[in-house]
Image (spheres, rainbow, N blue to C red):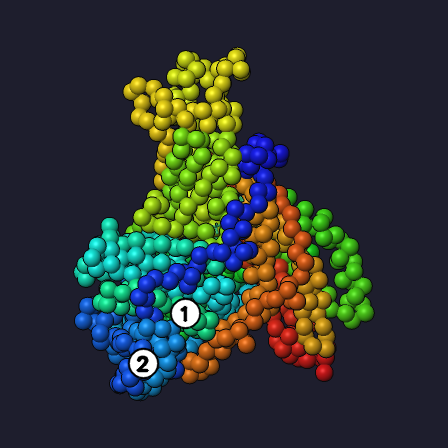
C-alpha cells in the first residue's frame, strides 16, 4: 500500500532513517555506564561458587583493609532494614543478599563498596566466605520426586519443591478426541535454558540526595514506571516515597526481556546510596550477566497431537515441567504463571486442546523471562511446529500441504482458538504460499529427492507460526496488580513542532523514529519535527514498559488516540480561524479546509500557533493530549518461514543454506525498521536452534557461563536472510498494526529444527532437541550407521 503522507512528512509506510542512529554510530549514546556523578562510589558483588550451601561466616577484614574499600555489605546488614528479601514479579520471594544459605552458583553473597571500580573488584576477591555445602538439585524431575530435599526452607510450610500447577483447556473433550483418533504422535521436547546476551549488561547508578530526599536511579530497565512503583512498595518503610523516586532508563543496549526483572544489584546499590548519601554505581560484567541474571525457557514438554487419517488435526495435549530455578522470578502477567504458553494450538484449527504446566524449584538462577518472546510463546510455537511436522511425516504428507489443510482460514477470523484466545486476523495460507513461491519449494523437494538418492543429507523445514503480542487488555493482564495499559502524551509547541512522551522504553527498536511517524501520519506534522522521549519517570506518562512486542500494539495505539484528541481540538481552533462550523471542515493530513472551498484552509502549524496566540474564547489555550490505551484484544502477528539445510555427514555440522521469512505484522509503520527487527530476530532464532544452551553439572556448576562456551552466532554462522511480508491489518488496533519485534525469534527455531529432522527422517530420526550441535548430529549419524 502506498504511504498516505509525503516523504517530507514521513508518516506510516516510509522507511524513515532512524533518528537515534547518528548518536549511536558516533559512539555518542548515553548508556548507564556513561553516567558519571561527582563523588560516585562503586559496587562489586561477591558470588557463590556453590549451588547450594549454608553460609557459616563472612570475613570482611582483608577486603576492608584494601585502600579505597569502604564497606562490605552482607545480608545481615540488609536484614536490619528488612531489605534482605524482595518480591519477584510472580509474587514469589527472592534474596537480595543471603542470611542463611545460597541457592545457586553465582548467587550474590555480599557486596563491596569502594571509591573505584578496581578497588571494589579487589575487595570482592578478598572477602572470605566459609560455606557448608548442601545437597544440590539441578533436575526438576528429581526435584519433584518424593523425599527430595526441600530447597525453600525459608518458606515455613513448604514440604516439597513444587511451585504451582496450572492447566487450561477442555481435558475431557481432548482425552475423548485422543481415544477416537485415527493417528496420534507423541514427543518429548526439551527447550533448554538460554540467556539473553545483550551488548550492554545490567547496571545502575543510584543517587540518594539527602538534602532533597530524592532518589534518582539511572537503570538498565525496560519498565521504568513499574520499577518505581515496586521500589516505593518495597522500600516505603525506609522512607522511599514514590513522588521522590525518579527512574531514568537512558539509552539501553538491548533488553530482550532480560532487563525487566529487579536484580539484587540494583537494590543493594540503592540501599548503599541511601545509607551513604553518595551516588553508587553497579555494573555487571559479562559473566555475571550470563550466570546470575534471569534465564529464559527451560521447559520439559511432552506433547501429543491427534488427527484423522486424511490429515485433519483434531486435538493437542501437552504436559510441561517448568524449571524456575530457586524462585519463580518469571516476568509473566500475574494471571498466567506459564505466560501465554496456551497459544500453543498455533495456526491450526483444532477441536480441543488441554495444557498442563507444573513449576519446580531447583538450585539454579531464577527467571523464566520472556526472551524476545511474548511470555513463553517461543516454547509454544516450537512445540506445535515440531509436532505439526512430526504428524505430517507420520502421515506421509508433505509438511506444507499438511499445514495448508489445517490452517485457520481467513474467513474464520476473528477466530476463537481451542484454548480460548480470540485471534484478531490472519491469512496463514497466504503467507505460506508466498514463502513457498519465494524459495521455490517444489524445486527444492525435487533437489532433495535427487540428493537423497546420492546419499546427501538435505532438509527443508517450515514454521508457520502465530504470535500473540500487545499485553494486554486490562481485564486479563497485570503485573503485580498494575494493569498493562500504555501511554502517550503529546504537546504541540506554538511553532508547530512537538514533543511526545511514552510509558514504553526502546532498547534499540527505533521508537524515536516510529512513534514520530505515527504522529506524522495522524497530524501531518513532519516526523522530523517531533521529538520522542521515553524512560524518565519524572516526565513520561505512566506505562508498563517495552517487552513482549507490546510497544506498537499498546503505546503505538495510545499515540494514535492522543493525536486524534489533538486533532479534535485543532478542529475547534480551525473553525474559529476560518469562521466556519466545525462540521463543515474537512481534515486532510496536516490541514483543515472548508468543505467545498479547499483554498480556505489552515495547516496544523497555523492552528498550533493560534492555540497559543489566538485561541477561541471558552476553549483552553495550548494543544496537548494524553492517552492511556487499554487494548481491547491482543494482536496476532504471524508468518511462514522456510529453511533449507545441508547436513555434513562427516562432522554433523548443519549449514543453513537458505532461509525465507514472510512476516505479517499488519500495517507497517517503517518497512526498513521492520526488516531490521526481522533480521535481528532471525539471528536470535538461529542461536538457540544451533548454538546456545546453558546447562549444569550434577552439583550445579554452570556450563555455558562465558562466551567461550555460550556460543552466539557471528556473521560466519548467520545466513543471508531473505525476507518479505504480507499485510493483514489488525481490525481492533487504531492503525491496523501488530507487533513484530519478536516474531522472528519465536518462529525461526522450529523451521531450522524441522529442516534438520527432515534431512534425517529417512534414517529413522524423529526429533532432535535444540541446540542442534554438530556433536549431537554426528552421534545420531553414527547410531544410524551413516558415518563412522
Ligand atoms: O515492543 P517493541 O518495540 O519491542 O516491539 P514492536 O512493537 O514489535 O516494535 C518494534 C519496532 O518495529 C518499533 O520501532 C516499531 O515501531 C516497528 N514496527 C513497525 O514499524 N510496524 C509494525 N507494524 C510493527 C512494529
Dot 2 falls on a residue whose secondary structure is loop
Q: Is mark 2 within 8 Å of ligand 1?
A: no
Earlier-in-chain disc, 2 versus 1: 2
In the image as oriented, which residue stretches furthest toward the front? 38
Rendering coords of residue 434 (x, y %): 68, 46
Count neighbours of disc 1 (C-alpha within 10 A) and say few if under 14, some if 14 to 19, many if 20 or more. Answer: some
How many numbered circles does the render carry?
2
Q: Residue 609's quadrant in the figure?
A: top left
Q: Is residue 609 shown above or below 505?
A: above
Which residue is disc 1 drawn over?
Answer: 284
Rendering coords of residue 361 (x, y %): 36, 72
Could you tell me if residue 770 is visible in this image? no
Q: Is there a contact, CB below 8 Å, between mark 2 and mark 1?
A: no
Q: Nearer the viewer, residue 497 or 330?
A: 497
**Left or right position of 203 against 465:** left
Rendering coords of residue 477 (x, y %): 36, 49
* Residue ID at (41%, 55%): 250
Q: Nearer the viewer, residue 735 or 437?
A: 735
* Residue ID at (55%, 55%): 25
Real-space Cα separation, disc 2 to disc 1, in angstroms: 22 Å
Q: Residue 270's quadrant in the figure?
A: bottom left
* Residue ID at (59%, 39%): 14
Q: Residue 263's quadrant in the figure?
A: bottom left
Quadrant holding the N terminus: top right
Dot 1 falls on a residue whose secondary structure is loop
Q: Nearer the viewer, mark 2 or mark 1?
A: 2
Q: Is residue 93 shown above or below 602?
A: below
Which residue is disc 2 drawn over?
Answer: 67
**Left or right position of 690 against 519:** right
Q: Is residue 732 shown above or below 85?
A: above
Amino acid at each position: 500500500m502506498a504511504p498516505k503522507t509525503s516523504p517530507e512528512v514521513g508518516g506510516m509506510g516510509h522507511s524513515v532513517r532512524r533518528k537515534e542512529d547518528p548518536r549511536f554510530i558516533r559512539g555518542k549514546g548515553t548508556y548507564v555506564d556513561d553516567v558519571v556523578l561527582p563523588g560516585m562510589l562503586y559496587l562489586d558483588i561477591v558470588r557463590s561458587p556453590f549451588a547450594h550451601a549454608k553460609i557459616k561466616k563472612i570475613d570482611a577484614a582483608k577486603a576492608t583493609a584494601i585502600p579505597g574499600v569502604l564497606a562490605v555489605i552482607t545480608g545481615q546488614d540488609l536484614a536490619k532494614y528488612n531489605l534482605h528479601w524482595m518480591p519477584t514479579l510472580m509474587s514469589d520471594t527472592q534474596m537480595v543478599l543471603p542470611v542463611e544459605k545460597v541457592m545457586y552458583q553465582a548467587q550474590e553473597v555480599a557486596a563491596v563498596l569502594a571509591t573505584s571500580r578496581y578497588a571494589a573488584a579487589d575487595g570482592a576477591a578478598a572477602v572470605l566466605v566459609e560455606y557448608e555445602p548442601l545437597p544440590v538439585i539441578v533436575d526438576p524431575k528429581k526435584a519433584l520426586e518424593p523425599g527430595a530435599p526441600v530447597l525453600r526452607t525459608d518458606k515455613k510450610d513448604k514440604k516439597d519443591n513444587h511451585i504451582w500447577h496450572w492447566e487450561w483447556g477442555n481435558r475431557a473433550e481432548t482425552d475423548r478426541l485422543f481415544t477416537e483418533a485415527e493417528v496420534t504422535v507423541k514427543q518429548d521436547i526439551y527447550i533448554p535454558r538460554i540467556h539473553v546476551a545483550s551488548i550492554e549488561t545490567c547496571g545502575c547508578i543510584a543517587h540518594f540526595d539527602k538534602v532533597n530526599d530524592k532518589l534518582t536511579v539511572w537503570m538498565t530497565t525496560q519498565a521504568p514506571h513499574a520499577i518505581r512503583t515496586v521500589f516505593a512498595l518495597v522500600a516505603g518503610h525506609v522512607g522511599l516515597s514514590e513522588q521522590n523516586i525518579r527512574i531514568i532508563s537512558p539509552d539501553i543496549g538491548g533488553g530482550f526481556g532480560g532487563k525487566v526483572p529487579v536484580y539484587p544489584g540494583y537494590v543493594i546499590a540503592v540501599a548503599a546510596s541511601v545509607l551513604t548519601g553518595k551516588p553508587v554505581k553497579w555494573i555487571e560484567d559479562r559473566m555475571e550477566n550470563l550466570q546470575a541474571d534471569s534465564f529464559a525457557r527451560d521447559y520439559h514438554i511432552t506433547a501429543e497431537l491427534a488427527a484423522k487419517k486424511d490429515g485433519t488435526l483434531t486435538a493437542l495435549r501437552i504436559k510441561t515441567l517448568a524449571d524456575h530455578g530457586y524462585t519463580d522470578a518469571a516476568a509473566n502477567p500475574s494471571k498466567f504463571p506459564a505466560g501465554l504458553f496456551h497459544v500453543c494450538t498455533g495456526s491450526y484449527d483444532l477441536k480441543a486442546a488441554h495444557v498442563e504446566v507444573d513449576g519446580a524449584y531447583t538450585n539454579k538462577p531464577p527467571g523464566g523471562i520472556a526472551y524476545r518472546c511474548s511470555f513463553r510463546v517461543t516454547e509454544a510455537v516450537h512445540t506445535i511446529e515440531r509436532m505439526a511436522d512430526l504428524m505430517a511425516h507420520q502421515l506421509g504428507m508433505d509438511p506444507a500441504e499438511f499445514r495448508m489443510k489445517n490452517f485457520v482460514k481467513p474467513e474464520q477470523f476473528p477466530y476463537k482458538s481451542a484454548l480460548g484466545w480470540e485471534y484478531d486476523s490472519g491469512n496463514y495460507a497466504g503467507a505460506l504460499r508466498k514463502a513457498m513461491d519465494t524459495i521455490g519449494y517444489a524445486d527444492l523437494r525435487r533437489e532433495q529427492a535427487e540428493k537423497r538418492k546420492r546419499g546427501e543429507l538435505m532438509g527443508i523445514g517450515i514454521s508457520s507460526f502465530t504470535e500473540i503480542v500487545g499485553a494486554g487488555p486490562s481485564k486479563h493482564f497485570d503485573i503485580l496488580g498494575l494493569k498493562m495499559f500504555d501511554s502517550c502524551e503529546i504537546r504541540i509547541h506554538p511553532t508547530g513542532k512537538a514533543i511526545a512522551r511514552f510509558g514504553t522504553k526502546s532498547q534499540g527498536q527505533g521508537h524515536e523514529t516510529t512513534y514520530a511517524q505515527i504522529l506524522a501520519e495522524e497530524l501531518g506534522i513532519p516526523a522530523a519535527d517531533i521529538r520522542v522521549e521515553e524512560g524518565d519517570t519524572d516526565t513520561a506518562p505512566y506505562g508498563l514498559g517495552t517487552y513482549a512486542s507490546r510497544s506498537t500494539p499498546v503505546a503505538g495505539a495510545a499515540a494514535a488516540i492522543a493525536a486524534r484528541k489533538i486533532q479534535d481540538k485543532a478542529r475547534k481552533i480551525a473553525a474559529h480561524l476560518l469562521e466556519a462550523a466545525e462540521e463543515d471542515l474537512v481534515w486532510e493530513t496536516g490541514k483543515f479546509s472548508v468543505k467545498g472551498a479547499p483554498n480556505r484552509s489552515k495547516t496544523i502549524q497555523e492552528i498550533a500557533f493560534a492555540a497559543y496566540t489566538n485561541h477561541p474564547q471558552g476553549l483552553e489555550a495550548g494543544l496537548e493530549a494524553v492517552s492511556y490505551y487499554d487494548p481491547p484484544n491482543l494482536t496476532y502477528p504471524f508468518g511462514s518461514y522456510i529453511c533449507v539445510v545441508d547436513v555434513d555427514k562427516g562432522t554433523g555440522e548443519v549449514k543453513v543454506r537458505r532461509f525465507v521469512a514472510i512476516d505479517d505484522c499488519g500495517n507497517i509503520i517503517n518497512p526498513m525498521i521492520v526488516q531490521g527487527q526481522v533480521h535481528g530476530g532471525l539471528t536470535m532464532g538461529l542461536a538457540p536452534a544451533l548454538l546456545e544452551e546453558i546447562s549444569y553439572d550434577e552439583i550445579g556448576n554452570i556450563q555455558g557461563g562465558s562466551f567461550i562456551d555460550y556460543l552466539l552466532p557471528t556473521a560466519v554462522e548467520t545466513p543471508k536472510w531473505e525476507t518479505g511480508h504480507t499485510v493483514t491489518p489488525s481490525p481492533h488496533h487504531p492503525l491496523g498494526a501488530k507487533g513484530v519485534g519478536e516474531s522472528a525469534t519465536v518462529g525461526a527455531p522450529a523451521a531450522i529444527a524441522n529442516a534438520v529432522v527432515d534431512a534425517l527422517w529417512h534414517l529413522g530420526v524423529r526429533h532432535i532437541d535444540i541446540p542442534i550441535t554438530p556433536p549431537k548430529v554426528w552421534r545420531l549419524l553414527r547410531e544410524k550407521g551413516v558415518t563412522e
